[in-house]
Image (cartoon, rainbow, N blue to C red):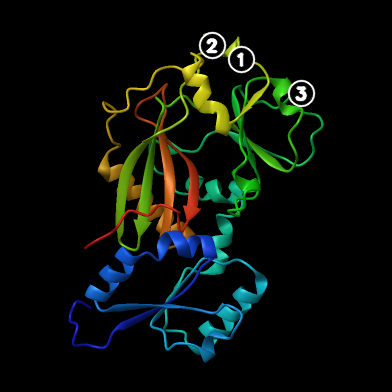
Amino acid sequence: MSNLSSKPYQIGYALTPKKEQTFIVPSLLSCACQNGVVLTKIDPTKPLIQQGPFDCILHKLYDSDWKQNLQDFASRNPNIPIIDSPESIDILRNRISMLETVSKLKINNTGVPKQITITEVTGLENLKLNFPLIAKPLDADGSETSHKMHLIFDKDGLNNLTAPFVLQEFVNHGGVVFKVYVAGKYFRCVKRKSLPDISEEKLVNLKGSLPFSQVSNLAAAGGGEGCKFEKTEMPPESLVKELVEGLKEELRLNLFNFDVIRDGKNKENYLVIDINYFPGLLPLFRP
């Protein structure tokens, strides 16, 4: 592909305006050009078979008309890769099916936090979950609503939630999350600051709920335990690689990222808490 005298590799992309603005940037276009790649914007309202030619399709659109457009194109061009299959992407648009894929992997010292789906805000007295909890909308479709999450400290904090949603046990993890980015056969793991730990002593004095947007105030007010970010060790690369390979096979996706935390009660255990398709922040991958 680096041989510029050969025919350019044509990638057609179909993205939301917001995604296009953050992803199709001059540095990417320049890098693509230097490697013999041409990025061409697709008009999703027109048949794909009337556009191109394309050697690959890259997309992040979800509506039914677009899915049908892709299906028609794929039926006529079975050898042209589509990144990625809408059916595979849909698995990540539901927070229960998303993490069920992790449980299927059966990788030692990995798992997901205990969680349940709430379809009606009634009968929440016997949840069989330990506070604090994280309340997340069931749908993970990238909309503004899907990002509205809350930290729940007691039963009173459940009163104002709108079903359907997922309740997930909050696991102390040293205030650090490991974000693993996957692009084909390449992956990269980076660490980022996360929600602060909450001790049992502090939990007694925390009431109701708190939107994630205000959780940073929790640490500032002394409600969270300290985070030694710089000294936090990365997870074993062998474990990360095993998770990457397992999720790629289970999800049948090429472009995604997942978030992993280290269990504060058992440093050998790692929990996957979220998986996203075509993430907003994707580190530059170079062979």
Secondary structure at badge 2 equals helix
- Whether the residues at callouts 2 and 1 have beta carbons within 8 Å, the answer is yes
Task: Identify the residue under disc 3.
Answer: 125
Q: Nearer the viewer, residue 57 or 81?
A: 57
| Whole-percent x, y for residue 97 in the image | 59, 51
Residue 252 visible in the displayed image: no
Image quarter hosting the C terminus: bottom left
- Which residue type carries mark 2? Lys
Q: Is residue 240 left or right of residue 263?
A: left
Q: Residue at x 76, y 31 (%)?
A: 160
Residue 75: name its quadrant: bottom right
Residue 119 visible in the displayed image: yes
Task: Identify the residue under disc 1.
Answer: 206
The total of numbered circles placed on residues is 3
- Which residue type carries mark 3? Glu
Front: mark 1 or 3: 1
| Whole-percent x, y for residue 115 in the image | 60, 35
- Please report whichever mark, 1 or 3, sits nearer to the chain's N-terminal start: 3
- Whether the residues at callouts 1 and 3 have beta carbons within 8 Å, the answer is no
Q: Nearer the viewer, residue 230 or 73?
A: 230
Q: Is residue 191 above or below residue 23?
A: above
> Which residue, as the protein is rendered here, is positioned at the far right?
122
Q: Is residue 122 left or right of residue 22?
A: right
Task: Identify the residue under disc 2.
Answer: 202
- Whether the residues at callouts 3 and 2 have beta carbons within 8 Å, the answer is no
- Please report whichever mark, 3 or 2, sits nearer to the chain's N-terminal start: 3
| Whole-percent x, y for residue 219 in the image | 47, 20
| Residue 151 tag number | none
- Which residue type carries mark 1? Leu
